[in-house]
Amino acid sequence: MIKSLAMWFLIIIVGFILFALTQVPFQMGFLGGYQGINLTIIGILQAALIIPLIYFGIRYMKLDFTKIGFTSSKWKEDALLGSIVAICWALIQFIWFIPNTGGADRADISGILTMLDHQWINILWYIPLGVIGGGLTEELYNRGFVIGTIANIFRNSRIAIYVSAIFAIIFFAAGHLPMNMIEWVDLLVPSTAYTLLYLYTKRLTASIIAHGLWNVLAVIVIFIIYG
């Protein structure tokens, strides 16, 4: 158990570093900046670096991806559930929350508009980042590995699962570097929703769909309303 926990901690640290390394240079303006084709490159890089890292970690623990919920079982039901969650959160955000917390003046909204550079083509470049880097890779890492491996290490102990779930919720939000309370809420709510989907279904499909769909809906709606 101690060796498995040490590996769990190591994968969490290395994964966080890899997520940062694939984004920070672009966000700082290097290599063409955080826009255009670079958005697609970032999403592909994240998947190419972090998914093998997760595979290495779970194999060390004598697990496989199905043991952490990455399975096609009941994918239609899970995809529908994830879609409903993403759409409901989008409605709440864009009808009520964002307009009442600054709208286009919010730093995160202006940041997305800068990333898109007021060009529809940039939404297409962003989709692989939002779906592959966000929906798939982040969910495998933040939900599947963080919670799923702990569940296996502690033989599905409820306490261990709940503690790892709370950690996953906060870690996901903190990893996106929120700058104020509004951004914390914007991150904690979906992070909690994705985690609850994972715990409820015991599979990653619903949280992957919810996360990826939300990312895509967000940039499209922001572009239409504020672009």
Image (cartoon, helix red, strand yellow):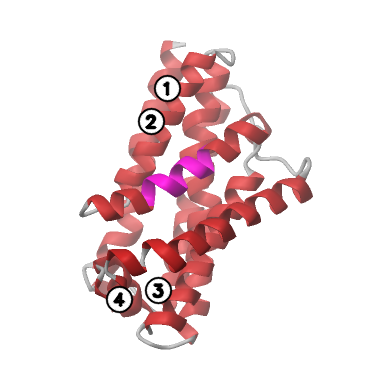
- Image location of residue 87, percent across then percent down: 58, 60
Taking depth in this image into account, of 66 and 177 the one nearest to the observer is: 177
**Residues tagged 1 and 4 counted as in contact (Cβ below 8 A):** no
- Image location of residue 171, percent across then percent down: 35, 38
Taking depth in this image into account, of 146 and 89 the one nearest to the observer is: 89
- Image location of residue 99, percent across then percent down: 35, 69
Q: Between tags 2 and 3, which lies in front? A: 2
Q: Which residues are magenta?
A: 187-195
Q: Tell me which label, 4 or 2, sits earlier in the chain.
A: 4
**Residues tagged 2 and 1 counted as in contact (Cβ below 8 A):** yes
Q: Tell me which label, 3 or 1, sits earlier in the chain.
A: 3
**Residue occupied by mark 2:** 167
Number of marks drawn:
4
Q: Residues within 10 Å of mark 2 (few under 14, many from 20)?
A: some
Q: Between tags 3 and 4, which lies in front? A: 4
Separation of residues labelled 2 and 1 (CA atoms): 6 Å
Tell whether position 188 is magenta.
yes
Q: Tell me which label, 3 or 4, sits earlier in the chain.
A: 3
- Circle on res. 163: 1
Residue 53 appears in the figure: no
**Residue occupied by mark 3:** 38
| Predominant secondary structure, magenta span | helix
Identify the amino acid type marked 2: Phe
Residue 167 is left or right of residue 24, and the answer is right
**Residues tagged 3 and 1 counted as in contact (Cβ below 8 A):** no
Residue at 55 percent of width and 36 percent of height: 196
Separation of residues labelled 1 and 4 (CA atoms): 36 Å
Separation of residues labelled 3 and 1 (CA atoms): 36 Å
Residue at 52 percent of width and 45 percent of height: 139
Identify the amino acid type marked 4: Ala
**Residues tagged 3 and 4 counted as in contact (Cβ below 8 A):** no
